[in-house]
Image (cartoon, rainbow, N blue to C red):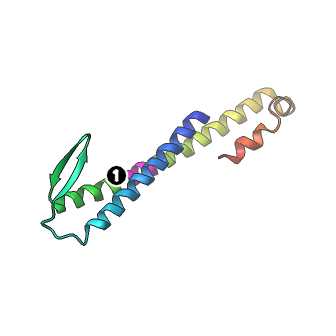
Amino acid sequence: LNHQADQCRASIRRCEVESKRSELTAKELEPLPDDSKLYRQVGKMFLLQPKQDMTNYLNATSAMKTVEGTQLKQALQKLGEQASSEMNSLKELLGPEKFKAVFGNMTQQGAGGK
């Protein structure tokens, strides 16, 4: 579960960065005239696009990444709940004394999160 949570955190960070990049790029395009030549990178090539299409694309990307980030945050929360549930099940199975003897201070580290 820790590995999944780390992957989820990294994905959330990537979504936030990509969303912010799209917002900033769209803001930089505002002062340009409507007939400016703009190129959008697609893989290794660049496509000529009208300013309006480029602005729409950047706004859509920003919105999509914001939604994706929200979904990933919900998934991370569910992973945390799952880990907590598994910890409680294990504690119930082993008993509080043996659980503390086996895992000791690991419960404080797990409860604190990253």
Q: x and y percent of residue 66 in the render? A: 40, 54
The residue sitting at 71% across, 45% down in the picture is 111
Q: Residue furthest bottom?
A: 31
Examine the structure image and report whether residue 80 is included in the region drawn in magenta: no
Number of labels in the image equals 1
How far across and how far down the image is residue 79, in percent? 57, 39
Q: Is residue 74 above or below residue 99?
A: below
| Amino acid type assigned to the residue bearing label 1 in the image | Met
Q: Residue at x 51, y 41 (%)?
A: 8
Q: Which residue is mark 1?
A: 64
Residue 95 horizontal/vertical position (percent): 82, 30
Q: Quadrant of residue 20?
A: bottom left
Q: Residue furthest left?
A: 35
Please provide the residue range marked out in magenta: 63-70
> Is residue 103 shown left or right of residue 18?
right
Please provide percent x and percent y for residue 87. Answer: 70, 35
- Magenta-drawn stretch, dominant element (helix, strand or loop): helix
**Residue pictured at 32% horizontal, 61% vertical:** 25
Q: Is residue 14 left or right of residue 84?
A: left
